[in-house]
Image (cartoon, helix red, strand yellow):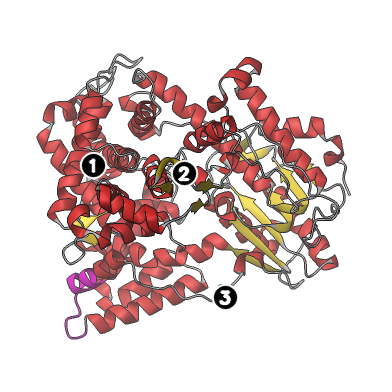
Amino acid sequence: MVHTLHGLALHIATRHPEQSGLDFERLTLVSPTQSNRLIRICVEQWLSAYPQTYQRLLEGKGFDGEETERLRRQSVLRTEVLPDLAYTVIHEAKSSGLLPPHLWELSHQEQRISADGIDYGVLSIAAGLYERYQVLLQQRGFIDYDDMILAALRVLENDSIRQFWQSQIFAVFEDEAQDSSPLQTQLLKILATDPNNPTQMNLVRVGDPNQAINSTFTPADPIFFSEFCATCQTTDTLAEMDQAGRSSPIIISAANFLLDWVNRQYGGADRTRFHPKTLPFRPQHIHPVGFNDPQPDANPDPEGAGLEVRFPPDVYQTVNLIGLRVAELLGREPEARAAVLVRENRQGRFITELLRHPEQHGIEVNLKQLGIDVFDVGEQDRQSHVPSDMLTLLHFIDRPHSPDYLKAALQLLIDRQLIPAQDLNALVSLPEQFLYPSPLDPPPSESVLQARRYCTGLLRARLQLPPYQLIPFMALTLQYEQAELATADKLANRIALQTFGESSLSSMIDALSEIVRSERFEPIETDDPDSRYVRPGQLTIITMHKAKGLDWDFVFIPFLHEQMIPGTLRVMPQTQFMGDFNLAEIARVQIRSHIHGEPEIPDPQTAWIRAASLKTAEEYRLLYVAMTRARRLLWMSAAHQAPFSWSKPENLDRRSPSPILLALVKQFPIALSKR
């Protein structure tokens, strides 16, 4: 049998509804959209139930009681801080088997005073939010993915049922084990146990803790798999698959150097020897395969030096160098595959814009004229967001004075890079003043004027256009690409059919809400989806996360600046009134410290320092994954001038390269030689 972990759990739970408590005639799997809506509701309920704690959060530090600032802070807490805390805690705690009573008990052990002298009680806030979320799930007949695992474990508590399942399963094989949560591991261990010999477990887990790149935003903590490997090592049941035929030897050497360098920088000699769980990487090297390995073109000869490092003057020249090198390589080998790996989608959008319109940006080569397609994976993925984008704008034009709807619309405009990033909470605290200021109001900044023009333009469209034309108008306003526009047209037609005879804004919102809620709207694909990421003769632009599991002959990794990798765990300016930390990240570390069996829950300041270390480790693991996607050429760069925020790529400033890039150049001086 082949299952996902959740599919396996659901298979067991539905076979025994009395023991699992899951009855799918009355229970429904909650969708991400529904879950987000429940989180917003539980935040509002928590605000009413704990007014004193809310007031303490609101006051934070340095509050003078000014009403405009109070409204801004209220918006930040309601729409950002508390939903983020709830989402993080629910997933971290539930995936580890911690229910609200456990979290309440844990909150009593919490050292609440931070370095700023502020007493928040992060875990008690988290427990209150988690408790209300669980109640809302039950009231609405919803379950989430973690409920499936918990239900299967409840079933297996019954001795006879557990022995039945164990007798049906001889062995369990798990792939990508570094991404498993404690509950999932517990389920597999039970199923892999021999019912006639409880000490015998036929469990094979395959994974690589050095490719754990989801642990800072999911409950997947690579420490658990590393500990499993350490246990296996003591019983001589650990097999290390340390050979790989994908990459040229110099690329393998560069990846191994990254691993060693990071562990030295962030571990130290003694800690490397005595505290392996604190290291960013498991100390293991990749080796080329043997001479007679059967895979074709194993460890191929490098293209040129195989490793190239560049330090262009600015990010525009970076894209120019990539374009010229791609034109040379694919012009010579049209069947080869090439990709640019970026840290975030906005970087990919920047590269795509320059390469598709080279004459507007001083790019010396036109890839399209050479027959080289530029395929932006992020651009294709954005099509699936068309329904939610349209719903966001329709909600706004229906209730423009709602701070929540106004903020969502403004955030969408920022994400589409139509208006500059700015403090939205200050704008939405007084929606009427923002949208229609009086002559006595102070003059706004240019960024506020841009935001106002877009918003008032949308409101005028509601008055001047029939409802069925609103979606195409909003798609043009968001400056959608071809495939997105086609998807928006398809959506508009579907809405028109569903609201036939009752064409109004409210009926459109109801129909669109159902589409978003059910998540059953397929975007229009203008390309063949099969193998679209690794097509020969194409330059694929893709994020490092999405590139995992894929490979290309030539891989370009630009914009490797210190602020990006390893970066820092930033506190957003709008939340700094609470202190120099993030409540969600503190709660994550505190919960994990308990799960790892530490005797004390770390105080907020210590937890924040640990959270920063976790981010650093994961960013370097992400770079490791990106580097090992290359077969014959790994091209890396950091420009001298780069934007601080990729929402404003035109605002360039001096940026330092990632320290690992300088170390690589020192170790591999050939990487700097120009062709």
The residue segment tinted magenta is: 500-511
Mark 1 or mark 3, earlier in chain: 1
Residue 447 seen in the figure = yes
Crowd band around label 1 with a 10 angstrom C-alpha radius: few (<14), some (14–19), many (20+): many
| Spot occupied by residue 53 in the image (x, y as percentages of width and height) | 17, 27
Depth order, front residue of 186/627: 186
The mark nearer the N terminus, 2 or 3, is 2
Q: What is the three-letter code of the residue carrying label 3? A: Asp
Q: Are the two marked residues, 1 and 3, in contact with CB atoms closer than 8 angstroms?
A: no
Mark toward the start of the polypeptide (2 vs 1): 2
Q: Left or right: where does residue 192 sit relative to residue 235? A: left
Distance (Cα) linking label 1 and label 3: 43 Å
Q: Which mark is residue 429?
A: 1
Question: In the rendered view of the protein, which quadrant contains the N terminus?
Answer: bottom left
Instruction: Tell me: residue 545, above or below residue 577.
Output: below
- SS category of the residue bearing label 1: loop
Measured in 3D between alpha carbons, the distance from the residue under mark 2 to the one under mark 3, in whole angstroms, is 47 Å
Please state which amino acid type lies under the numbered disc 2: Met
Q: Nearer the viewer, residue 323 or 42?
A: 42
Q: Can residue 401 be seen?
A: no
Number of the label disc, if any, that sits on residue 379? none
Residue of label 2:
201
Mark 3 lies on residue: 527
Mark toward the viewer: 1 or 3: 3
Circle 2 sits in a helix, a strand or a loop, which is it? strand
